[in-house]
Image (spheres, helix red, strand yellow):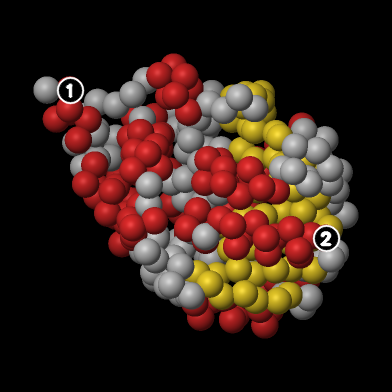
């Protein structure tokens, strides 16, 4: 019975169980903006901040971090309402709207709380947006920028995100989400689905199916639809930028990679053939090597 309930999202792991299973030896929980933000800090050297995308968690960087933390201090954290951070609540205990302004304030607050003065920002997907946004708004803090399959321009949304913009479905997710849909969505971000490890797929499901997390997603998808991304700001980015893109990305078109390359003044583009939306998971060795080379040449 529990297995059936879990498959339809009516039940799910509690927060304590998730923390016991998915917190890292380097995990801390930072008090910030009324949230207990799940943060991992490892390694030593120049600061590098990594930000994940929609429905992911800081674990998406683990393979890359294992290599880069030998040379850099890596700071990564779970965006609300995902991972072990969970949703942002208002004073009444209700899930608050998490719009672009909220996420800008959130990233600012986390980096300020951690006293990050100068860093390289690395972001994937929505985390790519938050990274280039940070570079544009805080050039004094960001000395280098790496964005991968980033959000920045208005475009048709993947069907798996579009579902959460439909009010009846957004309401339904407060009560149930079929696990098979989530498995399809995770497989869809890989160019080569055979590279998706079973334990990684199960981690995505467990963290997303946690009821407070999945019931809050409808309160944040407006970041993709409200027209507030401000791509006109991209030419203002001052730091050197590396753009990495999966050639088989089905979520953010390869055409967007060219637009970023044209609009960000000091940028270079690398396309990974036969790789999907999350190159840092699908091709971590290559991704880490490109990041290290780029940072060493800043």
Please name the residue shown 56% across and 55% down the image. Answer: 284
Asked if residue 31 can be seen in this view, the reply is: yes
Q: Which residue is situated farthest in the left direction here? A: 1
Residue at horizontal 61 percent and vertical 24 percent from the top = 25
Residue 185: percent from the left, percent from the top?
Answer: 32, 54
Q: Is residue 161 visible?
A: no
Count of number-bearing discs: 2
The one nearer the camera, 262 or 285, is 285
Q: Is residue 71 above or below residue 138?
A: above
* First in residue order: circle 1 vs circle 2: 1
180 shown above or below 233:
above
Residue picked out by circle 2: 296
Q: Nearer the viewer, mark 1 or mark 2?
A: 2
Q: Give the label on residue 2, or none.
A: 1
Left or right placement of residue 79 versus residue 177 in this view: right
Residue at point 33% right, 24% down? 13
Query: Which element is circle 1 on?
Result: helix
Q: Percent from the top left, x then y, of residue 207?
A: 40, 34
Taking 278 as reference, is 212 left or right? left
């Amino acid at each position: 019975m529990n297995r059936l309930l879990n498959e339809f999202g009516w039940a799910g792991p509690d927060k304590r169980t998730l923390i016991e299973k998915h917190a890292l030896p380097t995990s801390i929980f930072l008090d910030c903006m009324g949230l207990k933000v799940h943060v991992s800090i490892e390694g030593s050297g120049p600061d590098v901040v990594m930000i994940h995308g929609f429905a992911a968690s800081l674990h998406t960087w683990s393979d890359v971090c294992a290599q880069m933390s030998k040379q850099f201090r890596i700071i990564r954290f779970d965006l609300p309402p995902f991972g072990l951070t969970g949703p942002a609540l208002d004073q009444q205990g209700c899930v608050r709207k998490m719009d672009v302004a909220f996420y800008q304030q959130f990233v600012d607050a986390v980096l300020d709380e951690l006293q990050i003065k100068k860093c390289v920002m690395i972001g994937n997907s929505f985390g790519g947006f938050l990274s280039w946004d940070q570079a544009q708004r805080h050039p004094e803090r960001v000395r280098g920028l790496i964005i991968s399959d980033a959000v920045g321009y208005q475009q048709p949304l993947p069907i798996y995100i579009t579902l959460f913009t439909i009010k009846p479905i957004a309401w339904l997710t407060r009560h149930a989400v079929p696990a098979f849909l989530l498995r399809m969505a995770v497989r869809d971000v890989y160019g080569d689905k055979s590279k998706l490890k079973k334990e990684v797929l199960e981690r995505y499901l467990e963290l997303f199916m946690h009821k407070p997390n999945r019931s809050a997603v409808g309160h944040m998808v407006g970041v993709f639809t409200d027209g507030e991304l401000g791509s006109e700001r991209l030419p203002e980015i001052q730091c050197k930028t590396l753009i990495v893109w999966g050639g088989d990305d089905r979520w953010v078109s390869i055409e967007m990679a060219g637009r970023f390359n044209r609009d960000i003044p000091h940028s270079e583009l690398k396309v990974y053939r036969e790789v999907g939306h999350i190159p840092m998971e699908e091709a971590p060795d290559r991704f880490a090597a490109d990041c290290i080379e780029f940072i060493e040449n800043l």
